[in-house]
Image (spheres, rainbow, N blue to C red):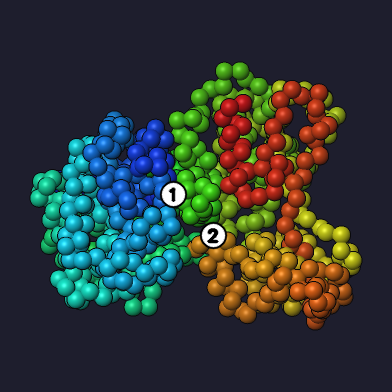
Amino acid sequence: MKYDKLFETAKIGSLTLKNRFIMGAMGVGFAEMNGNPTDRTVAYYEERAKGGYALIITEVTRVQDTEFCTPLEPSLGSDKFIPGWKKVTDAVHAQGAYIFPQLHQPGRQYTKAILGHDTSAPSPIACPVFDETPHELTTEEVWDNIHMFGDAAVRAKKAGFDGVEIHAGHGYLVQQFLSQFSNRRFDEFGGSIENRARFACEICKDIKKKCGEDYPVIIKLSGEEKVPGGMTISDTKIIAKYLEEAGYDAIEVTICNYASLDWMSAPEDEPMGFNAYNAEKIKEGVHIPVAAIDRINTPEIAEDIIETGKADFVSISRQSLAEPFFPAKIKEGKISEITPCINCLQSCMGYMTDPNHLTACCLVNPRVGHEAEYTFKEAEQKKNIMVVGSGPAGLYAAYVAAKRGHQVTVYEAKATLGGQFRIAAFPPAKSLLTGPLRFWLQEGKKAGVNYVLNTEVTKELVEEKKPDAVILATGGKQLVPSIKGIDKENVFLAHDVLEGIKKVGRNVLIAGAGLVGLETADFLRERGGRTSTLIDMIPAVNYGILGVGTHLKARLDSIGTQYIMGAKIKEFTDTGVVYEQNGEEKTADGYDSIIIAMGAKAYNPLEEELKGIVSEVHVIGDAKEAGQANKATEEAAAVAFRI
């Protein structure tokens, strides 16, 4: 397939872009707490400029130091940030790309506990997520905010940015003015569409006045909010006309607000490029360029969007985390070498919404945030490395180590590579998980990795092979507790059911309501509509990361999945279980089959045995501690880039 349209030039205002690829803004949290960009910021954007993007848009950047949506959000709130940003823009320009900051005010979508003061909004209506009534901006304060955007744009220009993007999507302050969902004002900034659009329009006019008419200003706009009473594409098409008249040079079309965040980074059960429809509808009514965003993960869907005229540009976000060189590899015809985004959201959205992290990474590309630190430079001392286990940790470590010049052999006890990650791809909307397995194997083979199947590694084998280093990535074993009756013929392990080794009845009891249990229930739902009841000691169900988890819950709710929570299983019976709940013994019966999905435990039989035999032994992934796959690849990277 040819991708000619993606590499045609196109203009945004006074700029001529070398291709149709925009790197979309995503929160990554590499700035200092005070908002100053860091060396990590420089390396992160520089890498993607090298990768061939015509235009890079930074993560949300505050225009007022006291207003942000994450403590590590960078700032253009004062002149002191100009030198730090100049390092970023210089690095990006040196690679032949343009760069805009995404100027941002959160409005009501944050919390006083972090900000240290009340949030502000067009109207005193609480954000459905944070449930804190905001301060209603006075008309004078509205104008003050307009000028803050303009002043931040002036600083951006001084710092070397080629233009700016205004964030009017995802429910932030500018969108709060645009939408009747959040705007109940009756001054010149509320009521009619024209009045609700005034805030966004005046921001553009103020920037053009201060920075020059030829200074490009684009706007990121939610085509629809996906909430009752929120903006629809019918509203947004009209709003877009006002924005064009105000002087905006392009519109990037996103989706949702915080009450519908599961749409912002939609999982696999939404079609690729699903939001291009909204971009197409807006493009019908304006003469300025339009960029499409959301689940544009492959060259084919990107080319189709441009070729069919749905949009003038494609904005690549999560995929740019997984593969910084997405445009360059397409241009060079290296399609199979593109690292695939799997829409897992574990290390991007998951980390950014976790107060214990607040900085992004990527399951399939754990170099994110470590671009300057983790390089594929040739190892100074070449080693013979034995990798034990072929899950994500083992495959990623082997690929990286071999690419750096080491001699690497991967040993797998089973007949199939991939570990538990291979099985994890079997439930609905999880097929993308096979992508990185294919990629790591393909690139590992190119780098010279030798893969040995059906071989259990023992102390004797290690003594025979005499490796310089051993990486233990033996993974985890499914947890099977010592509970009376667990060896009955009607009791099965979740992995055996998912792999099709064991077949279960129509009405199933699943012991364990974690992700394995939930995804097993979803797997059974898809196969003949089998119904499941999940039982667990935990007090409430956690469906996982917003988006992936929200959609999983909806699928399970659609067939009336039942839950018995806060319950300790005492015994398995022929038709169910005896359990204790709130100090009372109860029974749950009438089930055809019982499935054990109680999590995993680390499997690491070799570490102690290898002491004194191999001088360098590394334990990574579930072999170290059972957890999510993103932890496994991060630990693999930490070893393989330094070994």
> Mark 1 sits on what residue?
319
> Mark 2 sits on what residue?
545
Position of residue 636 relative to residue 542, above or below, is above
| Residue 504 shows in the view | no
| In the foreground, 610 or 499 | 610
Q: In the rendering, at what x and y percent does residue 260 appear?
A: 42, 68
Residue at left 40%, top 42%? 33
Residue at left 43%, top 57%? 113
The answer to whether the residues at label 2 and label 1 have Cβ atoms under 8 Å apart is no
Under mark 1, the amino acid is: Gln
Residue at left 56%, top 30%? 641
Measure how far apart labels 2 and 1 are at the Cα level.
18 Å
Position of residue 570 relative to residue 289, above or below, is below
> Disc 2 or disc 1, which is closer to the eye?
2
Position of residue 238 relative to residue 98, above or below, is below
The residue tagged with tag 1: helix, strand or loop? helix
Give residue 531's quadrant in the image. bottom right
Farthest residue in the bottom direction?
Answer: 590
Give residue 609's quadrant in the image. top right
Position of residue 90 relative to residue 569, above or below, is above
Is 526 on the left-hand or right-hand side of 38?
A: right
Q: In the rendering, at what x and y percent does residue 592 appear?
A: 80, 77
Is 582 on the left-hand or right-hand side of 429?
A: right
Label whose residue precedes the other's in the sequence (2 or 1): 1
Under mark 2, the amino acid is: Ile
